Image (cartoon, rainbow, N blue to C red):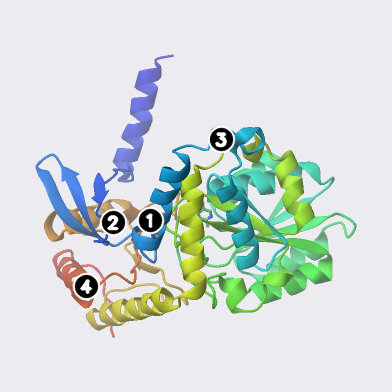
Amino acid sequence: MDFEAFFKSELDGLHGEGRYRVFADLERHRGNFPRATRHTPDGPKEVTVWCSNDYLGMGQHPAVIEAMKEAIDHCGAGAGGTRNISGTTHYHVMLERELADLHGKEAGLIFNSGYMSNWATLGTLGQKIPGLIIFSDALNHASMIEGIRYAKCERVIWKHNDLNDLEAKLAAADPNAPKLIAFESVYSMDGDISPIKEICDLADKYGAMTYLDEVHAVGMYGPRGGGIAEREGLMDRLTVIEGTLGKAFGVMGGYIAASTALCDFIRSFASGFIFTTALPPALAAGAIASIRHLKASPFERVRHHDRVKKLRTMLDQQGIPHLHNPSHIVPVIVGDAAKCKWISDILLDTCNVYVQPINYPTVPRKTERLRITPTPLHSDADIEHLVGSLHQLWSRCALARHVA
Ligand SMILES: *Cc1c(COP(=O)(O)O)cnc(C)c1O
């Protein structure tokens, strides 16, 4: 086989569909988020980032940066091993305590990313619990889907956020089989929020465990940033809460919070936890500082909500269609991969506005979109510039508008 030709022809297919991924080559500036330098063939340009998952700008927060520097000065760069073989530093231990406290659970367990935490935890539960059936929301993140696939257990996919469909499927399964319901709180592409309480009620009725991915909510919702389940007073009803340290907390890493026995079980059996070098201590130190700050400070969350509201209002005034949802994610649907990429390119090249186009398979075909994520650090002028740029483009491209 001509491997090179194969790779190239597969890539040509992506180009043909307009969904070949091009990375923007960026350099963020300490203390100047959401501004970044973009490196182009014509030299560096300043852009405003509108699609970061550093939702609160904590990756630039002085407390986080100082904590990371201090940890490097204190104990060097890497962890030096897997958690089991010399890689557990005091920072890791403190971080796990911090996370358990954040979610009101007995224990926390950290992974090298949120992806790894979903993959390893769901994979291990599904492999090790005899006869486990995992009931997975149809729009669950790729990392959950891969974990369930890796588990090779029985899996039942229920219609997104559809309680009737979930109940019908729970009722149809063997009453004696152990069950787990896996879902998210804030779904990252549409920004809708699941009915956590009602799902927990069904879990109680059918004797199922619950597994909630709060990746897009931790740090941002609830009085201490514990997520939607904290806001709604439901944390104790979830068997496992999973989160990331890489989005609103601004650093990197993933985790679960659950009972001592469950965390110890995953720690002891999950390949994706055991056989990989621990996070650098400085990352753990930065995450601790970020979590502690957001537990005590409502300022970022209040300002964040205000910015989201301001952006939505201005989009509405210009008739730029966006999905109305109860979260901080503002999806502007374009509905065509090539057009979406084209709009994004023009925004970047002529307006210095960076919003990455979101295409299949991240979202279904025909729902290609610009996914806009305002942060507390976007000013009124930034919002006006973004909406003004979109307004001009919408006129130029004769894109559909909403009648306000
Ligand atoms: C980003 C994401 C993850 C993975 O988290 P990382 O820390 O980025 O690996 C998991 N679940 C959802 C819903 C996500 O959007």
- The answer to which image quadrant residue 340 occupies is bottom left
Q: Is mark 4 within 8 Å of ligand 1?
A: no
Q: Quadrant of the N terminus?
A: top left
How many marks the image carries: the answer is: 4
Point out the tag, 2 or 1, that comes first from the N-terminus. 1
Point out the tag, 1 or 4, that comes first from the N-terminus. 1
Above or below, 252 relative to 97: above
- Mark 4 = which residue? 387
Give the residue at the far top of this rendering. 1
Q: Residue at x 61, y 74 (%)?
A: 230
Label annotation for residue 340: 2
Q: CA separation, marks 2 and 1?
A: 39 Å
Q: Do the CB atoms of the residues marked 2 and 1 lie less than 8 Å apart?
A: no
Residue 333 x %, y %: 35, 65
Question: Of the residues shown, which amino acid type is indicated by label 3?
Answer: Thr
- Mark 3 = which residue? 277
Give the residue at the far right of this rendering. 176
| Callout in the foreground (2, 3) | 3
- Mark 1 = which residue? 66
Q: Is mark 4 on a helix, strand or loop?
A: helix
| Callout in the foreground (1, 4) | 1
Residue 153 x %, y %: 75, 44
Question: Of the residues shown, which amino acid type is indicated by label 4?
Answer: Val
Residue 295 x %, y %: 52, 71
